[in-house]
Image (spheres, rainbow, N blue to C red):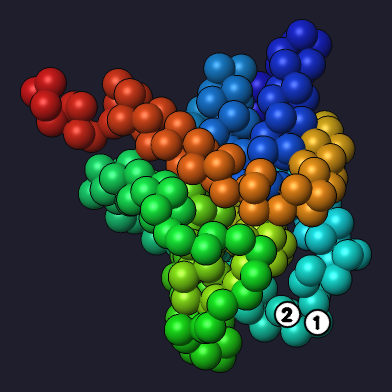
C-alpha cells in the first residue's frame, strides 16, 4: 500500500472536503475523490476501496445532519438501509467475476437521461407527491438494486437513488436528498466491508480524508436544507452531466476503445 507525501495528503484532503460538500447536496462526490486518489498513485481497486472508507464518513455525517432536522426517520429506514448494504456487498462480489464494460458504456447515457428528467419535470420542488410504488415494494426491490450497483460499480448511485425517491416514492427533492444519503451510507458500508476483507483499503489515507469529508458534508447538508430544491436540482443536473462527460472522455472507456479500434 502506498504512503503519499504530505503535499499529496493535503490535496487529497481538499478533494475530500469538496467531495463531501457536493455529495451531501447532489451526490457525485466520487467524481472528485476517486480521480484524486488515482492521481495520487493508487491503483483503481485501491482508489475505489479507499473512496468507500472516506465516503462512509461523509454520507454518515450528512445523514445525521438531515436526521437531526427530522428529514429522515432512521428507525423507519433501518430495513431499507440493511437491504442497501446487503445489495452493495453482493455487487462488490459480482464485480470480481463479471466484466463491467457494458455497464460503463451505458452509464453516461443513463446519467444524461437523469439530468434531462430533472430539467424537464414540472413541479420539481420540496413538496411530496403521490407515490407510484408502495414503501414495502420500493424498499424490497429498488433499494437493494441500486445498492447492488453501488457495490459493483459506484458512480452515479446517489443520482439513481434521487431519481427513484422523486419519481417512484413521490418524495420532494430535499426529503429525497436526505433519504439518499442514508441509503448511500449503507451501501458504502457494504462495499467497504468487502474491500476491507480483501485488503484493498488504505486506512491511513481513507481515515484522514474521512475526517475532512465530515466537515464538507455537514456544510453542504446545512446549505441544502436552507435552500432546498432551488439549490439541489441544478447541482444534481450539473453533477450528472459532469460525471457522464468524465466517463466518456476517459481514454480507457470501452466506447472510446471500440471507436478507436
Q: Nearer the viewer, residue 109 or 227?
A: 227
Query: Which mark, by number, is residue 78?
Result: 2
x and y percent of residue 57 in the render? 78, 48
Residue at image coords 43%, 49%: 119
Residue at image coords 41%, 28%: 246
- Contact between marks 2 and 1 (CB within 8 A): the answer is yes
x and y percent of residue 233 in the render? 57, 49
Query: Which residue appears farthest toward the right when viewing the image?
Result: 68
Whole-angstrom CA distance, mark 2 to mark 1, is 5 Å
Residue at image coords 75%, 22%: 14
Examine the rendered structure and indicate whether residue 226 appears above or below residue 126.
above
Which of the 4 quarters of the picture holds residue 212?
Answer: top right
Examine the rendered structure and indicate whether residue 203 appears above or below residue 15.
below
x and y percent of residue 111 in the render? 38, 47
The residue beneath circle 1 is 75
Q: Nearer the viewer, residue 94 or 73?
A: 73
Res. 41 in view? no
Amino acid at each position: 500500500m502506498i504512503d503519499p507525501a504530505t503535499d499529496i495528503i493535503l490535496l487529497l484532503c481538499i478533494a475530500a472536503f469538496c467531495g463531501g460538500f457536493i455529495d451531501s447536496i447532489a451526490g457525485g462526490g466520487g467524481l472528485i475523490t476517486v480521480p484524486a486518489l488515482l492521481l495520487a498513485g493508487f491503483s483503481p481497486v485501491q482508489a475505489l476501496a479507499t473512496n468507500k472508507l472516506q465516503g462512509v464518513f461523509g454520507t454518515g455525517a450528512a445523514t445525521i445532519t438531515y436526521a437531526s432536522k427530522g428529514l429522515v426517520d432512521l428507525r423507519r429506514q433501518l430495513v431499507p438501509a440493511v437491504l442497501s448494504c446487503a445489495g452493495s456487498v453482493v455487487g462488490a462480489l459480482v464485480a470480481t467475476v463479471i466484466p463491467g464494460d457494458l455497464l460503463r458504456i451505458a452509464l453516461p447515457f443513463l446519467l444524461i437521461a437523469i439530468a434531462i428528467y430533472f430539467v424537464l419535470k414540472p413541479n420539481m420542488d420540496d413538496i411530496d407527491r403521490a407515490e407510484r410504488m408502495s414503501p414495502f415494494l420500493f424498499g424490497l426491490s429498488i433499494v437493494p438494486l441500486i445498492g447492488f450497483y453501488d457495490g459493483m460499480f459506484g458512480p452515479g448511485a446517489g443520482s439513481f437513488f434521487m431519481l427513484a425517491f422523486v419519481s417512484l416514492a413521490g418524495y420532494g427533492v430535499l426529503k429525497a436528498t436526505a433519504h439518499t444519503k442514508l441509503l448511500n451510507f449503507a451501501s458504502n458500508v457494504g462495499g467497504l466491508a468487502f474491500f476491507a476483507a480483501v485488503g484493498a483499503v488504505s486506512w491511513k489515507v481513507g481515515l484522514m480524508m474521512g475526517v475532512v469529508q465530515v466537515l464538507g458534508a455537514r456544510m453542504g447538508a446545512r446549505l441544502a436544507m436552507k435552500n432546498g430544491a432551488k439549490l439541489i436540482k441544478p447541482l444534481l443536473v450539473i453533477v450528472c452531466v459532469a460525471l457522464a462527460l468524465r466517463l466518456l472522455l476517459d481514454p480507457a472507456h470501452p466506447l472510446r476503445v471500440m471507436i478507436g479500434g
